[in-house]
Amino acid sequence: MREFPLTLNRFITQNQASHQAATEEFSGLLTQIGLVGKLISEDLRRAGLINILGTTGDTNVQGETVKKLDAIANDDFVKVFQHSGYVCALASEEMEKPISMPGNWPQGKYMLLFDPLDGSSNTDNNMPLGAIFSVLKYDRADRLPTEGEMIRRGTEQVAAGYLLYGSSTMLVYTVGQGVYGFTLEPGIGEYLLSHAQVRIPDKGKVYAANEGNYNKWSEGTRKYVDSLKVSDKATGRPYSARYSGCLVADVHRLLLGGGIYLYPGETDKPEGKLRLLYEANPLAFVVEQAGGKASTGTSRIMEVEPKKLHQRVPLIIGSRSDVEQAEAYIQGNA
């Protein structure tokens, strides 16, 4: 008789007792994230047939053009969690200010920060897309959280992960006890455990970077990327370049096969492009739990002290040895 893989719900229930933060509400929150993934996945399957491609004509708080699917994905997150009872506040890359949820308070003990649709430039081209989420605990019972209370270091996350929409839909997450991946089985509408205790190789053979920005990078960053192209069998070079325009897809590739992703600061934008709270911190939590490393080039991502909700940060992430070598070049030690 064929053994049936664990469903997401069953896995969460079985592991609830082994993690002090994994309350029933916390388990429900993760299940609701899976529901958001199902909704967005269904829209993406029909994206070329219904009027959800292209832009809305608006710009978001980042000054970026909003794609229709950006708005739809953001709305899906808000609608699913608005009456869930699990979260008391939401913050999104697409929204200038957080949303408080008095209807979920005080029973909702968590705050959810998310990038609802990562890789928006891919929406009209049938290429990979994703979503990224970060979960924080809120312990006060006398009032709803303020915006400032959502601005925390990555080390304070109780869970983080991502949804990946590609040839299959996946939910990958960590609660600080390893990394687990679940693949959506569309025939039954369930996420099934497909990747248990994911471990990223210590060193890879792939790098991902937007080399169109090469001339804007620091000298150390340019030297490092140049070094990856040098033929040297002893060190496994040259590396192969793989850049999809979707951070989730690129990091997922590295999580399974090793390598490094770079979106460094630029000479005129040393703060970088990616958002600390919505992208860098949650992915850093996942990659570190898999044995990898995430850095600004000079410091650990999850120890960066955030000052504002939409703060940007350079991101160097992937296999530990590769990231450490990149740091050495960026810091002028290689």
Image (cartoon, helix red, strand yellow):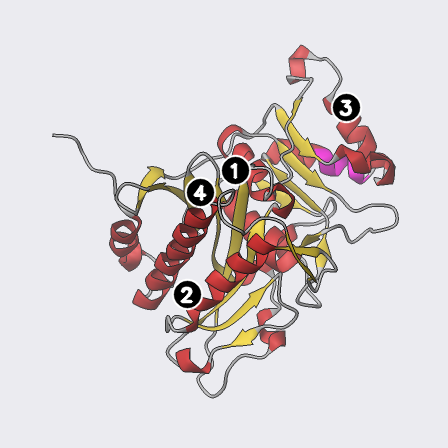
Asked whether the beta carbons under mark 2 and mark 3 sit within 8 Å of each other, the answer is: no
Which residue appears at 33% of the width and 63% of the height?
Answer: 28
- Identity of the residue drawn at 48% across and 67% down: 78
Q: Are marks 4 and 3 in contact (CB under 8 Å)?
A: no
Rendered image: mark on residue 252: 1
Nearer the observer, disc 4 or disc 3? 4
Given residues 167 and 173, the one toward you in this image is 167
Pick whichever of labels 4 and 1 is earlier in the sequence.
4
Alpha carbons under labels 3 and 1: distance apart: 24 Å
Q: Is residue 286 left or right of residue 64?
A: left
**Dot 3: within a 10 Å radius of its alpha carbon, few (fewer than 14), some, or many (20 or more) residues?**
some
Name the residue that disc number 3 marks. Answer: 227
Q: Residue under circle 2?
A: 80
Instruction: Looking at the image, tell me whether mark 3 or mark 1 is earlier in sequence order.
Output: 3
Q: Is residue 169 magenta?
A: no
Name the image quarter holding residue 266.
top right
Residue ID at (73%, 13%)? 231
Q: Which is the main secondary structure of the residues drawn in magenta?
A: helix
**Magenta part of the protein: which range?**
326-331
Q: Residues within 10 Å of mark 4 (few under 14, many from 20)?
A: few
Q: Secondary structure at mark 2?
A: helix
- Residue receiving disc 4: 45
Report the Cα–Cα distance between label 1 and label 2.
25 Å
- Nearest the viewer among 95 and 153 is 95
